Image (tube, helix red, strand yellow):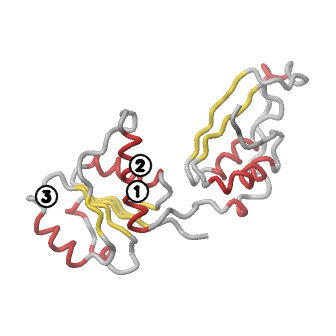
């Protein structure tokens, strides 16, 4: 299993750095350092420390000397961003995120899968929680009366499995899992989530 690309973020605006780091991690890469120019440590510029720098400076004129040093000393390639990252709730966020992802893939390739599904624990990580009183009368009724949506990033399968393993067996609930993962791993993910769990799991299809 390839390790996810190691990325460093440099931004002179705290919010911008946070948005960039969140988007990069959400795509499956590893953000090793997120800093402003004044607090960048020289050790991060060394060879093998990172695979890529993502740089966003709102006032490049102020940081010209820093940029000169970065260009001269950084062992990893530099990706300069153009424009403020939108909020995740903004309509154009998906388009911005896709554009960023295309650039990241172009520099360091697609991210590695953070979770090797074969290593997800074989047994539940915690004891199931007691079944709530309100559900005991429904123990014989397996019909789902509610749909709950779970969302998880690339690093999420182990946490999702632990959550499901800890639930009482009889719940009038169906789960829809939106999992950021390569499509080739979906069947394996289903097998992992079914293991040690009372829930049936299958890959969703049209209809």
**Which SS class for mark 3?**
loop
Q: Distance between the residues labelled 1 and 2?
A: 6 Å
Please state if 69 lies on the left or on the right of 11 as rendered.
left
**Which SS class for mark 2?**
helix
Q: Name the residue under label 2.
A: 98
Of the pair 195 and 111, the residue shown nearer to us = 111
Q: Name the residue under label 1.
A: 102
Residue 99 position in % (x across, y down): 37, 51
What's the residue at 61%, 55% (across, down)? Answer: 182
Of marks 3 and 2, which one's residue comes earlier in the chain?
Answer: 3
Mark 1 touching mark 2, by CB under 8 A? yes
Of circles 3 and 2, which is in front? 2
Q: How far apart are marks 3 and 2 (CA)?
A: 25 Å
Please state if 79 lies on the left or on the right of 104 as rendered.
left
Q: Quadrant of the N terminus?
A: bottom right
Quadrant for residue 78, please give it. bottom left
The image shows residue 167, relative to residue 146, as above or below, that is below
């Amino acid at each position: 299993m390839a390790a996810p690309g190691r990325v460093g973020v440099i931004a002179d605006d705290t919010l911008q750095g946070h948005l960039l780091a969140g988007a990069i991690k959400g795509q499956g890469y590893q953000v090793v350092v997120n800093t402003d120019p004044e607090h960048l440590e020289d050790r991060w510029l060394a060879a093998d420390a990172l695979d890529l720098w993502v740089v966003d400076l709102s006032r490049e004129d102020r940081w010209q000397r820093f940029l000169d040093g970065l260009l001269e000393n950084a062992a990893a390639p530099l990706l300069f961003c153009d424009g403020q990252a939108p909020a995740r709730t903004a309509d154009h966020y998906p388009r911005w995120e896709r554009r960023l992802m295309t650039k990241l893939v172009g520099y360091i390739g697609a991210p590695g899968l953070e979770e090797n599904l074969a290593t997800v624990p074989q047994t539940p990580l915690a004891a199931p929680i007691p079944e709530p009183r309100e559900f005991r009368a429904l123990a014989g009724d397996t019909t789902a009366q509610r749909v709950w949506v779970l969302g998880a990033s690339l690093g999420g399968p182990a946490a999702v499995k632990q959550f499901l393993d800890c639930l009482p067996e009889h719940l009038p609930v169906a789960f829809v899992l939106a999992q950021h993962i390569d499509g080739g791993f979906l069947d394996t993910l289903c097998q992992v989530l079914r293991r040690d769990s009372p829930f049936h799991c299958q890959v969703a299809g049209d209809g």
